[in-house]
Amino acid sequence: MHTPTIERNCSPTKIAAYLDGELPPREELFLETHIAVCKNCLTELNLQKKMLCALDFALDKGAEIPLPKNFAKVVATTAESKVSGLRSKKERFRALFLCVSLLLVILVGLGAETENVFSAFGKFSEQVVAVFGFVGHLFYELAFGVFIILRSLSEQFVFNSAISLPMVVGLFILSVLLFSRLIFRFDRS
């Protein structure tokens, strides 16, 4: 038979699993023989048993407190009405003060590297602005080109035939959808 040894890392989780009846029979037997020789585990077992008894007593069905029918609604309404977020000037000032304080702490922590960090941040922000400028200019030019094409087409259709305005608007929407589909399906490799 395997003799139990005193483990250095006795496991309170195994004791909890033992009390819940979740251990396999072999581990259960080993834990029982271990508890017989390990005072730490015996103490932990007794503490967990006491805690379970206290929980059973506290959660006894006879000890239930009756709650009003609209209890959840009252709690939610009270919580929502007392949450102020950053609505008051005092809270905004605190948030601003905290952000400035954190910035100063970061600057002090960076020390001599502050100039390098700011120059890298400047270069990064220039790149971001350039990308957003390019995308904005692209959409502006695209919209302008589509507008000119549709204007010339609408003059041809509206003034030279019996095509109505809703038909022109429908053609415009269809052309925008088809063009956007072409853009998103374009292979960038």
Image (cartoon, rainbow, N blue to C red):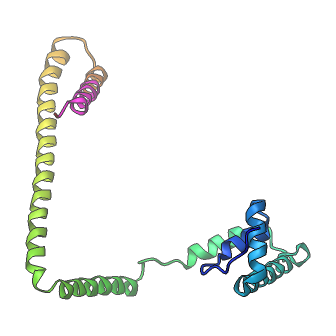
- Quick one: 50 or 84, which is closer to the camera? 50
Q: On screen, 76 above or below 105?
A: above
Residue 175 visible (yes or no): yes
Residue 70 visible (yes or no): no
Quadrant showing the C terminus: top left
- Quick one: 83 or 36, which is closer to the camera? 36
Residue drawn 13% across the image and 26% down it = 149
The quadrant where residue 151 appears: top left
- What segment carries the magenta color? 173-188
Q: Is residue 182 magenta?
A: yes
Q: Residue furthest right?
A: 62
Residue drawn 74% across the image and 76% down it = 34
Residue drawn 88% across the image and 78% down it = 63
Image check: 168 left or right of 62?
Answer: left
Q: Is residue 104 magenta?
A: no
Q: On screen, 2 above or below 165?
A: below
